[in-house]
Amino acid sequence: MPIQNNRLPESELEKNFSDIHPPFEHAEGAAIEANRCLNCYDAPCTKLCPTSINVPLFIKQIASGNIKGSAHTIFSSNIMGGGCSKVCPVEKLCEGACVFNLLEETPISIAKLQRYSTEQAIHEKWKLFTRKPSNGKKVAIVGAGPAGLACAHSLSLEGTEVTIFEKEAKGGGLMTYGVAAYKVTPTFCKEEVDYILSLGGISVQYEKQLGKDIQLADLQKNFDAVFLGIGVGVARSLEIPGENLEGVMDAISFIYNLRTRNYSQISVGDKVAVIGMGMTAIDAATQSKRLGAKEVTMIYRRTEHEKPCTEEELDLAKLDGCSFLWLSNPKEILGENGKVKNLVCSKMKLGEPDASGRRSPVDTGETFTIEVDMVIKAAGQIPFEGLVNNSKLDNKVGKIKIDNSGMTNLKGVFSGGDAVNGGKEVVDAVQAGKDAAKGILAYLKK
Ligand code: SF4
């Protein structure tokens, strides 16, 4: 069967893409879990949270039945605490730091508890924050992703009028367009954005792209400050022959299609190769399987030991039936009648550690060939270098440079999140948005 859509019945697709993390079914379940928490002094879980959520406090509030207070504690540090409870790699953040790990016991289900209170707040539209009176300032934000939304919320709380310009038709950025649907559903993403905007003082102009529909110079002229939360850009090419064949696509576009169309409309091959082993690669591989691909092979140039994804993500791909070729690097994609037919890979071995500290892959000179009809490239993303250069922003290969206050080389223009760091977790982008808001408010007072 060639690459095609509609491989599975609608009901099966719905099941395959439904929420993978079941919430607590009863308040008692949440209370029992919350009561396990030791309320550690100098809590390591809080220290490992990039937004410094007071974890023991919000858990204690759940244990005592104060769910509103708990949601307020979470949102005060992370206004996207709902989404983060579903997409954060908690095993290497808060839950990985929980002291129960030292006791060789199951860590507290911090994410599940966080989800418990934030979902109630979002669904029931609890009004937990009030804006200060107007400070008379106007700020433009480019990008309604996690950094932009966090920045907007923090600024609006202080009485600033915020206008967000977003190139897509919906807000949420990576959360809405770049994460597997079974981790965070499109419906939840919309509710979360609506909840953030319900504070007031924030308007969003959708389908307005920087450099096309809006120009930075105009924003500088018309607003007191500007925040660029433009994220990280386009998919990195593999730079190998055969990339233009029909059946080769990048994981970003594949996941974007999944998030913006009906699952039955998304085409997938019989035999899919996914290049890469990061979170996006895992999302592409597992979702290919869940769309009905017969074989999905993940290809990575180092060993399992050096993989960038977490153990939990790898387990998920294993459970979904994906297979793995370690120490393998794509060398050429071969086609027939313009369509993908084979993938030629180099066999690699491990050499000396590179700048990342991981042992580097070295070509052994041997190759092998596998039969595939679809290749999904998930070899990272490269920043919007052209856009950044055209805007005369100081940058390092497209990554925008900022000072300690979050300001770029252009006066009154701030940036943060993936546009600056080249791509980290959603929770890091939220913190970057908060930090930039602090820098902007200080700048506006001068
Ligand atoms: Fe509770 Fe674990 Fe955090 Fe301690 S480390 S406060 S037990 S969640």
Image (tube, helix red, strand yellow):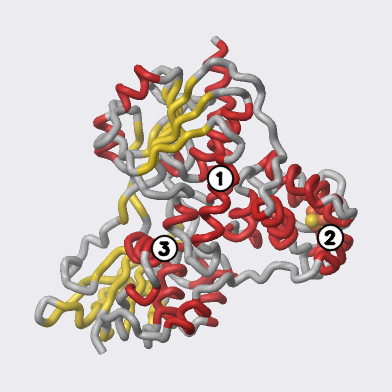
| Residue annotated with mark 1 | 428
**What amino acid does circle 2 point to?**
Ala
Q: CA distance from mark 1 to mark 2?
A: 25 Å
Q: Give the percent coordinates (x, y) of residue 15.
A: 52, 79
Q: Position of residue 287 (x, y in %)?
A: 43, 74
SS for dot 2: helix
CA gap, disc 3 to disc 2? 33 Å
Q: CA distance from mark 1 to mark 3?
A: 22 Å
User: What residue is shown with label 2?
Assistant: 34
| Residue 440 image offset from top left, x and y in percent | 53, 23
Residue annotated with mark 3: 259
Q: Secondary structure at mark 1?
A: helix
The quarter of the picture where residue 339 lies is: bottom left
Residue at 32% from the left image edge and 39% from the top image edge: 208
Which residue is at 49% across, 54% downward?
175
Pick whichever of labels 1 and 2 is earlier in the sequence. Answer: 2
Neighbor class of circle 1 (other Cα within 10 Å; few <14, some 14-19, many 20+) is: many
**Which callout, 1 or 3, points at the residue further toward the start of the chain?**
3
Q: Callout 3: helix, strand or loop?
A: helix
**Figure check: 21 above or below 132:** below
Q: Earlier in the sequence, mark 3 or mark 2?
A: 2
